[in-house]
Amino acid sequence: MPDEANRNNVTPSANDSKLTTLIHEVSHFPAAMNTEDSWSNIKWAQKQAARDKFCLNNADSIAAYVANIPNWDGLTPVWRP
């Protein structure tokens, strides 16, 4: 699995990476968020989030939020599907 892929402007792209996989898997832990795999992959999670802003039980939605894809700017994460 690749490291975090970056666009020309150094922002992470919406692809699965080591970082998003780690976040995805940790989010399944009951002590973390006890998420499910309702749908899988970052791009699909973004499409679903555009329809349902409360998709907090999906592991890839959490991974995209924590990695702040596609709105990564080095500051506080901002999720805007």
Image (cartoon, rainbow, N blue to C red):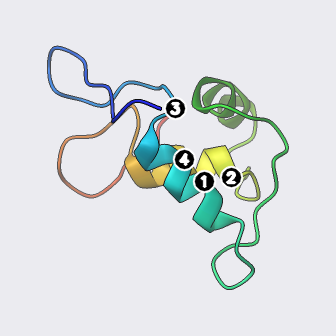
Give the farthest residue toward the front.
1
The residues tagged by marks 4 and 1 sit, at their Cα atoms, a distance apart of: 5 Å
How far across and down, in percent of the image, does residue 33 sit? 68, 73
Task: Tell me which residue sits at (41%, 48%) in the image.
Answer: 19
Q: Which residue is mark 2?
A: 59
How far across and down, in percent of the image, does residue 7 sit? 24, 17
Q: Quadrant of residue 44?
A: top right
User: Mark 2 and mark 1 in contact (Cβ < 8 Å)?
Assistant: yes
Q: Which residue is mark 4?
A: 21
User: Mark 2 and mark 3 in contact (Cβ < 8 Å)?
Assistant: no
User: Mark 4 and mark 2 in contact (Cβ < 8 Å)?
Assistant: no
Instruction: Please tell me whether mark 2 sits on a helix, a strand or a loop.
Output: helix
Task: Tell me which residue sits at (67%, 37%) in the image.
Answer: 49
> In the displayed structure, does residue 70 sit left or right of residue 42?
left
Residue type at the position of mark 1:
His
Q: Which residue is mark 1?
A: 24
Q: Nearer the viewer, residue 72 or 25?
A: 25
Point out the tag, 2 or 4, that comes first from the N-terminus. Answer: 4
Point out the tag, 1 or 2, that comes first from the N-terminus. Answer: 1
4 is higher (above) or lower (below) than 9? below
> In the displayed structure, does residue 34 sit left or right of residue 69?
right
Q: Which residue is mark 3?
A: 16
In the picture, the disc for residue 42 is none
Instruction: Please tell me whether mark 3 sits on a helix, a strand or a loop.
Output: loop
The residues tagged by marks 1 and 2 sit, at their Cα atoms, a distance apart of: 5 Å
Point out the tag, 3 or 2, that comes first from the N-terminus. Answer: 3
User: Mark 3 and mark 4 in contact (Cβ < 8 Å)?
Assistant: yes
Instruction: Please tell me whether mark 1 sits on a helix, a strand or a loop.
Output: helix
Residue type at the position of mark 2:
Ala
The residues tagged by marks 3 and 2 sit, at their Cα atoms, a distance apart of: 12 Å
Other-residue count near label 1 (Cα within 10 Å), few / some / many at <14 / 14–19 / ≥20: many
Instruction: Please tell me whether mark 4 sits on a helix, a strand or a loop.
Output: helix
